[in-house]
Amino acid sequence: MSNTDFQIKCPICSWNHDGRENWRCTCGHTWNTFQTYGTCPKCNKRWEDTQCPTVICGKWSKHEDWYIVPINIVELKLKSNYLIND
């Protein structure tokens, strides 16, 4: 899956990831957590949860919940009809 196949948004407030290095690890390193799927490139700490960097939200949620994959509803319907009729 390429970066164009999904969006990255806060699952709580829907803030769109801006591509910046908004996250700081306990080791002090600042990086873009979505380039490494939540793993700090300096100390290799794996973050299961990600905090929204906005002042308005600031909430923590599961890292994988930030990835929004668009669904092609027509393709999904065709596949489900195929499976039902199979």
Image (tube, helix red, strand yellow):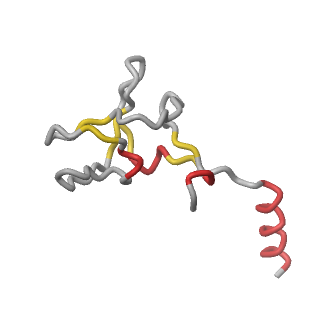
Which image quadrant: the N terminus? bottom right
Q: Is residue 60 left or right of residue 86?
A: left
Q: Is residue 46 left or right of residue 73?
A: left
Which residue lies at the image location 20% right of the left edge and 40% below the top edge? 29
**In the rendered image of this protein, does residue 24 appear above or below residue 83?**
above
Q: Is residue 42 left or right of residue 34?
A: left
Q: Position of residue 2 (x, y in %)?
A: 57, 58
Q: Position of residue 20 (x, y in %)?
A: 41, 34
Q: Residue furthest left?
A: 27
**In the rendered image of this protein, does residue 56 appear above or below residue 86?**
above
User: Considering depth in this image, is 12 or 39 the residue closer to the camera?
Assistant: 39
**In the rendered image of this protein, does residue 26 appear above or below residue 84?**
above
Q: Residue furthest top?
A: 56
Q: Position of residue 4 (x, y in %)?
A: 62, 51
Which residue lies at the image location 76% right of the left edge and 61% below the top edge? 76
User: Considering depth in this image, is 69 or 33 the residue closer to the camera?
Assistant: 33
Q: Position of residue 48 (x, y in %)?
A: 31, 50
User: Considering depth in this image, is 18 or 83 the residue closer to the camera?
Assistant: 18
In the rendered image, which quarter is residue 79 located in? Answer: bottom right
